[in-house]
Image (cartoon, grey):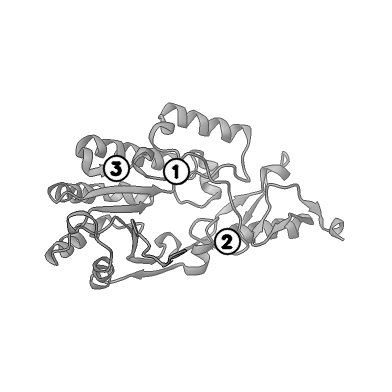
């Protein structure tokens, strides 16, 4: 870093280690029907059916898709290059892999054989990855406890607690899936204590997209009921939600352009973002 006295070392406190290239959820094409925005919906329900890969709001899914897994040696070389903190342990790092649980214990053992000491592993998961891999995670946490390694589920993209919005986001998940993942994390915390973390108090930042283009009084009521009933504000919800962003390159960009074509409308553009929250104008009004 350039300071007044010249170049000074930049303190690095967390890192990222790449294991998956792209997102497995974007590995195959689906053709969901995405509803019209609530702002222009009338009594007659309309939707757009279009082929897409991954979550509909994700431009990375469009750009990268999924290109497989790096081999263990490549992953370990990245970890070896991380700076060290107390007691010669590596700094905390995020493992870039949304489905790591079936192979994570093998990676941990391979790291241990190299005499590499870890301090903390941050995991970014999908809810279905946690549900299907929870037994693997339990085995991992037993080993982590013996080696004084903290495992944090730093982010799960829950995004909504309304099934209609989840469908329009093409998450491939339901509210029931989200709630099951939350119950599992709470149970794991009770069982493994200081070895395991998942909550906003422990540094996690789980995904919650609001507002969205499909918000209605009904969806707001469903979200709020679930949040209150399961106490999600206590450990799951981030300090503030993330508004839906529609980038030109995302599947929702194709969706909104198709609506514009069909309905003769035009939403404002703000750089690479389409302003779905604004009132659209008739195309002939644009001059």
The mark closer to the camera, 3 or 1, is 3
Q: Residue 250 carries which label?
A: 2
The percent coordinates of residue 202 (x first, y second) are 33, 41
**Whole-Å distance between the Cαs marked 2 and 3?**
32 Å
Count up the numbered dots: 3
Residue 96 appears in the picture as rendered = no
- Foreground mark, 2 or 3, reads 3
Mark 3: secondary structure: strand
Look at discs 1 and 2 and give the one toward the viewer: 2
Sequence order check: which comes first, mark 1 or mark 2?
1
What residue is pinned by disc 1?
A: 174
How many residues crowd mark 1 within 10 Å: few (<14), some (14–19), many (20+)? many
Label drawn at residue 190: none
> On the image, numbered disc 3 is attached to which residue?
197
Question: In percent of the image, x 20 and y 37: which residue is there?
Answer: 191
Image position, residue 100 (x, y; %): 29, 58
Q: What element carries label 2?
A: loop
**Which of the two residues, 33 or 252, is positioned nearer the viewer here?**
252
User: Are there few (<14), some (14-19), or many (20+) residues within 10 Å of tag 3?
Assistant: many
């Amino acid at each position: 870093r350039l300071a007044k006295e010249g170049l000074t070392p930049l303190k690095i406190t967390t890192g990222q280690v790449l294991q998956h290239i792209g997102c497995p959820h974007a590995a195959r094409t689906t053709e969901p029907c995405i509803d019209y925005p609530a702002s222009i919906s009338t009594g007659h329900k309309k939707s757009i059916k279009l082929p897409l890969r991954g979550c509909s709001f994700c431009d990375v899914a469009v750009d990268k898709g999924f290109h497989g897994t790096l081999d263990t040696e490549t992953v370990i070389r990245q970890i070896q290059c991380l700076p060290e903190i107390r007691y010669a342990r590596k700094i905390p790092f995020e493992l870039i892999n949304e489905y790591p649980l079936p192979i994570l214990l093998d990676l941990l053992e391979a790291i241990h054989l190299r005499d590499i000491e870890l301090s903390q592993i941050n995991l970014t998961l999908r809810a279905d990855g946690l549900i299907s891999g929870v037994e693997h995670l339990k085995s991992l946490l037993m080993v982590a406890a013996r080696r004084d390694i903290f495992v944090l589920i730093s982010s799960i993209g829950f995004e909504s607690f309304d099934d209609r919005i989840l469908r329009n986001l093409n998450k491939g998940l339901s509210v029931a899936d989200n709630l099951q993942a939350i119950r599992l994390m709470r149970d794991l915390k009770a069982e493994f204590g200081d070895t395991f973390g998942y909550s906003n108090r422990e540094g996690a930042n789980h995904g919650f997209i609001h507002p969205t283009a499909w918000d209605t009084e009904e969806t707001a009521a469903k979200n709020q009921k679930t949040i209150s009933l399961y106490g999600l504000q206590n450990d799951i919800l981030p300090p503030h939600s993330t508004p839906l962003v529609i980038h030109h390159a995302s599947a929702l960009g194709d969706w909104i352009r198709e609506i514009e074509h069909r309905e003769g409308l035009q939403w404002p553009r703000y750089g690479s973002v389409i302003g779905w929250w604004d009132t659209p104008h008739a195309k002939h009004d644009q001059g």
